[in-house]
Amino acid sequence: DESCLTWAKQPFEIDLGEVEAFIRRIDTAKKLRIVRGHFHARESPTENDTAERNALSQMCAAGTWGVQIDADEILLNPEEFLSWMEGMEGKHEDLAIGARWITVFKRFGDRALVVTPSKEVTLVATRLRGQHINARWTRQRVMVSPLKLLHFSWGRTGEELRQKLHNW
């Protein structure tokens, strides 16, 4: 279907009261906050993504690592990554941190076909604020961490895949 290959803004509505109630139920430690903004107002999905990441990065405390993981990514080794990041304190402040993307190509119930070996790296952490230039990327050199992210790029239902392509 070629209609999913052209991008056009589509109206949508979100019941923020329902979202906020859900967050209050699951966030007993009160660590989550809703960030309101017009993150769909730009000309392309990538520009929207970049603007959102810049806005979120501005909310991080200066001098700390801002880590951004997308909703369609699963950390396969979070403890190892956390330990590695703790070892980065005070070091390599001019670098961005990358992770290996393990791309899910197709799902079969609780199993998946993945692209292997994983050669894709994506940026997951930086100390910069408001300097993303293309989605999660900055102009920094990237140091690849031990983090492995299972990324559900193509491992989606037909409808989910059409929506993803349409939203690009």
Image: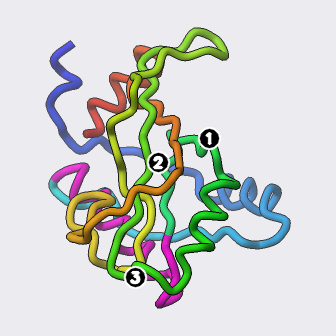
| Residue 71 image position (x, y, % from top left) | 53, 46
- Say if 117 sits above or below 24 in the image: above
**In the image shown, does 157 or 96 lie closer to the viewer?**
96
Q: Secondary structure at mark 3?
A: loop
Residue at 25% in and 39% down: 168
Q: How many marks?
A: 3
Residue underneath mark 3: 93
The earlier-in-sequence mark between 1 and 3 is: 1
- Say if 96 sits above or below 43 in the image: below
Residue at 35% in and 32% down: 164
Query: Could you tell me the amino acid type at mark 3?
Result: Glu
Q: Residues within 10 Å of mark 1 (few under 14, many from 20)?
A: few
Residue underneath mark 1: 76
Quarter of the view holding residue 166 = top left
Residue underneath mark 2: 13
| Residue 51 image position (x, y, % from top left) | 29, 67
Stretch in magenta? 44-66
Query: Could you tell me the amino acid type at mark 2?
Result: Glu
- Say if 101 sits above or below 132 in the image: above
> Left or right of 119: which side holds 15?
right
Q: From mark 3 to mark 2, how far is it between C-alphas?
A: 40 Å
Q: From mark 1 to mark 3, how far is it between C-alphas?
A: 25 Å
Q: Residues within 10 Å of mark 2 (few under 14, many from 20)?
A: few
Q: Which quadrant is the N terminus positioned in?
A: top left
Q: Secondary structure at mark 2?
A: loop
**In the image shown, does 69 or 102 lie closer to the viewer?**
102
Q: Residues within 10 Å of mark 3 (few under 14, many from 20)?
A: some
